[in-house]
Image (tube, grey):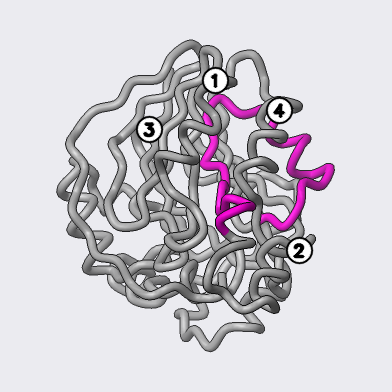
Amino acid sequence: MSLQIASLNSGSNGNCYYIANENEAVLVDVGISLREIERRMIRIGLNMQKVKAIFISHEHIDHIRGVEATSRRYSIPVYISEGTLRNTSMKIDAELVRSFDAHTAVAVGDLAVIGFGKRHDAADPYSFVVEGNGVSIGVMTDIGSVCENVSTYFKCCHAVFLEANYDEEMLANGRYPEFLKDRIRGDRGHLSNAQALELFLNHRAGYLGLVLLSHLSRDNNNPKLAQEFFATHAGNTKVVVASRDTASQVYTVTAESVEGKFDVATGTDQQYSLF
């Protein structure tokens, strides 16, 4: 028994993560356009008709850019907290808006999606764990610092999209203004490579098979640097970087192993945003 996962895009130019069992799939965040989602899913062999729900982590544009069009085109319910919805101007069909409670599983067919609060510069931010077929997948990005919720749910994951937004030295010496540097490395900003590694080392389960380093900054991090930062500590866990301008492979995650297949797609990049 297994789940399939893929990153359709990961970065300040847009975030979208796919998790599925045999019959249904969910998207966590839709921060790229519907056209790009459709194109990338076709390219890696995924079917949009399988997507039965969208879950929104918070209101920043790189997480909601394509929500309205995607929900409307395919009549997909959008699970979003009341606090997040109030802080957007999205016009989602009222019949497709769903609320959820923290730490309470939402059933999407045979998938169960659990949202939990985190620290981030947003109105009511959440991360998620998606469970099915005895496998748990975490989507843990846009985290300013590791709280008890994050560490607790991280321990249950067989695979996780884990934020590694910036290298501390690159951020300190980079071109961003000081106020923005302070926001990024603050308690409600983003996780650095070092903070992500600390979470990984202190709270991973023995069965954690795959980490997709996610939401890397274009200006303050480097994919090779981030992956090498983890490499000597990864052990039996496969560590890959989720791209900010292409879809990943589709990974099949079981309780015992991880397999990847399909070629990656080609995408576009955009200028950085604050988050």
| Quadrant position of residue 136 | top right
Which residue corresponds to mark 4?
Answer: 155
Mark 4–mark 2 distance (CA, rounded to whole Å): 24 Å
Query: Seen from this angle, which residue lies furthest front?
Result: 173
Which residue corresponds to mark 3?
Answer: 4
Judge from the rendering whether residue 138 lies leftward or rightward of residue 205; answer left or right: left
Judge from the rendering whether residue 38 lies leftward or rightward of residue 250; answer left or right: left
Mark closer to the observer (3, 1) = 1
N-terminal label among 4 and 1: 4
Which residue corresponds to mark 2?
Answer: 186
The answer to whether residue 253 is above or below residue 80 is above
- Specify start and end residues of the magenta stretch as a single range: 143-170
Where's the C terminus, which quadrant?
bottom right
N-terminal label among 4 and 3: 3
Mark 2 residue crowding within 10 angstroms, few (<14) / some (14–19) / many (20+):
some
Q: Residue at x 61, y 53 (%)?
A: 169
Q: Give SS at disc 2.
A: loop
Q: Residue at x 42, y 22 (%)?
A: 2
Q: Position of residue 114 (x, y in %)?
A: 65, 45
Mark closer to the observer (4, 1) = 1
The answer to whether residue 263 is above or below residue 14 is above
Residue 74 part of the magenta segment:
no
Which residue corresponds to mark 1?
Answer: 232
Q: Residue at x 30, y 26 (%)?
A: 260
Judge from the rendering whether residue 23 lies leftward or rightward of residue 77; answer left or right: left
Residue type indicated by callout 2: Gly
Q: Nearer the viewer, residue 275 or 96?
A: 275
Residue type indicated by callout 3: Gln
Q: Are marks 2 and 1 in contact (CB under 8 Å)?
A: no
